[in-house]
Image (tube, rainbow, N blue to C red):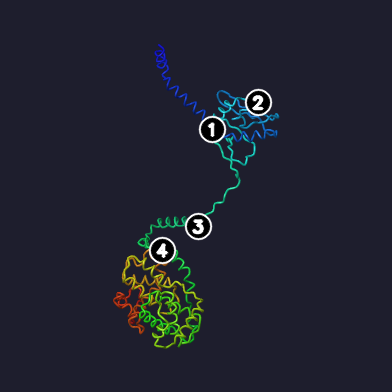
Amino acid sequence: MGLLCEEKNRVATGRDPEEEEARGSRLRVFLSSLFATIGGVLSQVVEQEEEEEGAEMASRAIVHLHENNGEVKQIHARADGRNRIVLQDIGNFVADRAAKGKKPITERVVAVAQGVKGKVVDKPKPEDVIVISSDEKTDKSKHVSKRQGSSRKQVKTLTSILSARSKAVCELMSRLNVSIEDIDGADAGNELAVTEYVDDIYEFYKLSEDEGLVRDYMDFQPDINSEMRSILLDWLIEVHRKFELTPETLYLTMNIVDRFLSMKVVQRDELQLVGISAMLIACKYEEIWAPQVNDFVFISDNAYVREQILVMEKAILDKLEWYLTVPTPYMFLVRFIKASIPSDDKMEDLAYYLAELGLMQYSTAVFYCPSMLAAAAVYAARCTLGKNPLWSETLKHHTGYSENHLMNCAKHLVKFQATAADSTLKALYRKFSSPDRNAVALLAPAKGLLPIPIHHGE
């Protein structure tokens, strides 16, 4: 009969008693968790205010909580000498406070849970506390930090600065829709290629090449001229081939000769001695197995003795202050030829041929910096071989020069190429006419870079 009555009640009310009981259980668990959370968070505030209660501060007022039509309102107490209690009784189970007519703890917690707002007039404590704001726009809790007024200064690291710059460059290049090929991608696994630092290395070369530049010194030399210099270099090219030295040695030898001649007056009969000693220094710097001093004595047909070469070597090093790590055109040629896509052995040999023709001539060796001479040699080689395009965005990016910047220097190089076969100084012409150099000296120069001939009578 009892089961029948319960079934009737369930049908009449439309509710299941078991479901009601489960719902009530979940509600009790939620309220218990809420009360425990509020009491735990505010326990520190209660303890601090209990310690300050004996101070009898006259500036505090009592906050009365009244319930009107189901809504909780906050009324500020008048200045009648009574103390205001701020979140003080929540979690405080002292019996004498309840005897003073204050509301039970459960009613105050429920009031706080329903969104009661109170104003805090005490100064924030050094420890982290939670303040219930009285702002009408928000009733969220705010954390007051121990050092609220001070903020740590944000310091930008070098990595963040470089990352930001790289990102900005990538965005700019994507806007311009410029296609720059990755010339170091194939060498990613080659440790000797140092692909992580190669761009920084060549940027340093560009910045430091001014320190190794040679100023115009022919007016400073009363006993020699530019033609004598060309004769000396032509002979040194033959010596370089005879000893089978590396290309770096030849370019450094030319740099040492020009820098020394720009600092010291040299007599005509000592010019060859300067060239021998400069190549000896360059061999010691670049070669694994450098020629001996006696080898240079023999190659000069005993024009100088061993002691003279050693004395001149010391004099050159003293004048240069042992500064031999200078960027030569060869260093830039290696990089720029790599950026000349597509490239082949003929393109490489022709660029070296044009660059060495430029170094043979005093005007181009002195008035053009190594990076521009190397870039102009690559540009003139591409024009000679009819590469398309003649100057790509990849080359412009890695060389730092546009086609217009290189035009004058390239025209000089092509002019030297056109007259090399008829010159009396044929060391370079013979060197690059050989099959192992792809006979690039026999190629016709680029007509677009040659000066337009003037025909009389037209």
Q: CA distance from mark 2 to mark 1?
A: 25 Å
Residue highlighted by disc 2 = 96
Q: Secondary structure at mark 2?
A: helix
Residue highlighted by disc 4 = 194
Sequence-wise, the earlier of marks 4 and 1 is 1
Sequence-wise, the earlier of marks 2 and 1 is 1
**Is the residue marked by circle 3 packed among few (<14), some (14-19), or many (20+) residues within 10 Å?**
few
Q: In the image, what residue occupies the spot 41% across and 20% down?
A: 16
The location of residue 172, given as percent across then percent down, is 43, 57
Q: CA distance from mark 4 to mark 3?
A: 21 Å
Sequence-wise, the earlier of marks 4 and 3 is 3
* Vertical placement of residue 324 versus 55, above or below: below
Residue at the left extreme, as displayed: 435
Q: CA distance from mark 4 to mark 2?
A: 80 Å
Q: Secondary structure at mark 3?
A: helix
Q: Are marks 2 and 1 in contact (CB under 8 Å)?
A: no
Q: Relative to 385, is 325 on the left or the right?
A: right
Name which residue type carries label 2.
Asp
Sequence-wise, the earlier of marks 4 and 2 is 2
Q: In the image, what residue occupies the spot 47% across and 83% down?
A: 310
**Residue 140 versus residue 104: which sits nearer the camera?**
104
Sequence-wise, the earlier of marks 1 and 3 is 1
The disc at residue 158 is 3
**Is the residue marked by circle 1 packed among few (<14), some (14-19), or many (20+) residues within 10 Å?**
few
Q: Which quadrant of the figure has residue 11?
A: top left
Q: Secondary structure at mark 4?
A: loop
Name which residue type carries label 1.
Thr
- Asked whether residue 45 is in view, the answer is yes
Residue highlighted by disc 1 = 37
Q: In the image, what residue occupies the spot 67% across and 30% down?
A: 83
Residue at the top extreme, as displayed: 1
